[in-house]
Image (spheres, helix red, strand yellow):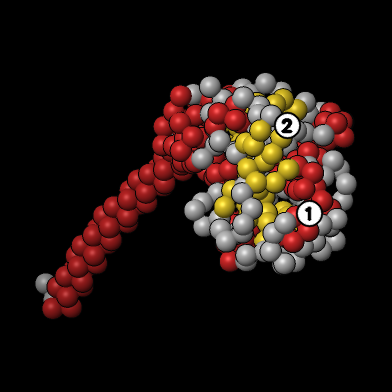
Amino acid sequence: MSQNKKYAIITIIILLIVLFFLFLSYNQNDHEKTEMTISNEQNDSISSDTKTNEKEIFIKGSDTILPVSIAESETYMKLHPQNKVIVIGGGSSLGIASFIEGEVEIAMASRKIKDSEIESAMNKGIAPAETVIGWDGIAVIVNKNNSFDSLTIEQLKKIYTGEVSNWKELGGQDKEIEVLVRDTSSGTYAFFKEHVLEDEEYAPVAVTEPNTEAIVQTVASDSAAIGYIGLAYADSSVKMLGLETTEGTFHPEQESILKGEYPLARPLQYYTNGKPEGEVGEYIDFVLSEQGQMIIKEIGYLPIN
């Protein structure tokens, strides 16, 4: 056999070997790609199932109830990890408005829903149902250096309408009263206006604070300031005033609130579309349970039972 033929045969054999290994490599990669595709499809399926099973509950509204709902939701989600509870403040009016628009499942309100709001909700096919989750007493607070320990509702009204503008007019120090109020979306703002001002307007000089914490901070640093807050926000940096009535002077304490003796006692409520059912009903049942009511007490409000 000639030398050229030998080289040709060897070259063909080498080419066949290379092609054989290329073929094996291609099949292996194709098999790995197939396995990867199947694996990705399985992961997508699992992820989709997880997302499908996860239920979201949106709660919005009263800043007074906000710390309660945050604490309740954190504990509830530990017990029910398949459910996600999203809590947003902003005030009772904002929460009810979002509820009417169908943006949230639960509205938090530290005041009763208005007839006009019920009408708006019904027009959109939403039937507001109220659930009282706890009790609060609006605390009237002043600086710790203020000489007053109590006021009458009439004196409060005169302060907040501007009829009285200096503490000396009530027998106190010669200082212009710094009147602090919540913003108009607040349920506490509306409740105080109805029950103290008897729906008269707040004094033009009243300073609007964005949230309850700001009222506490201002009162703590300003000896002439007066404000009102939800009971859970009161701390040792301010003085809570007693409210004088014909039956005596009462402070925002458990006994006087539950007996109806404290003039500014009020329920804290959730509003849902009809009777709470499904995940929403499950969450509210938890809030009303012994464990949920203990959380309300720990936050600083009063349980319903």
The residue that appears at 44% across and 28% down in the rendered structure is: 291
Location of residue 223 in the rendering, given as x and y in whole percent from the top left corner? 62, 65
Disc assigned to residue 125: none
The residue that appears at 79% across and 53% down in the rendered structure is: 160
Location of residue 152 in the rendering, given as x and y in whole percent from the top left corner? 73, 43
Q: Residue 9 is drawn in which quadrant?
A: bottom left
Q: Is residue 101 left or right of residue 213?
A: right
Residue 163 in view, yes or no: yes
Say whether marks 1 and 2 touch (CB < 8 Å): no
Identify the residue position indicated by label 1 in the image.
159
Amino acid type, callout 1: Ile
Identify the residue position indicated by label 2 in the image.
246
Location of residue 26 in the rendering, given as x and y in whole percent from the top left corner? 32, 56
Q: Residue 263 is drawn in which quadrant?
A: top right
Badge 2 crowding class, 10 Å Cα cut-off, few under 14, some 14 to 19, many 20 or more, is: few
The residue that appears at 56% across and 58% down in the rendered structure is: 144
Query: Looking at the picture, does residue 248 appear above or below residue 21?
Result: above
Amino acid type, callout 2: Thr
Q: Residue 250 is drawn in which quadrant?
A: top right
Q: Is residue 70 left or right of residue 90?
A: left
Residue sitting nearer the eye, 193 or 35 = 193
Residue sitting nearer the eye, 280 or 245 = 245
Spatial separation of the CA atoms under disc 1 and disc 2? 20 Å
Q: Secondary structure at mark 1?
A: helix
- Counting residues from the start of the chain, the first of labels 1 and 2 encountered is 1
The residue that appears at 11% across and 72% down in the rendered structure is: 1
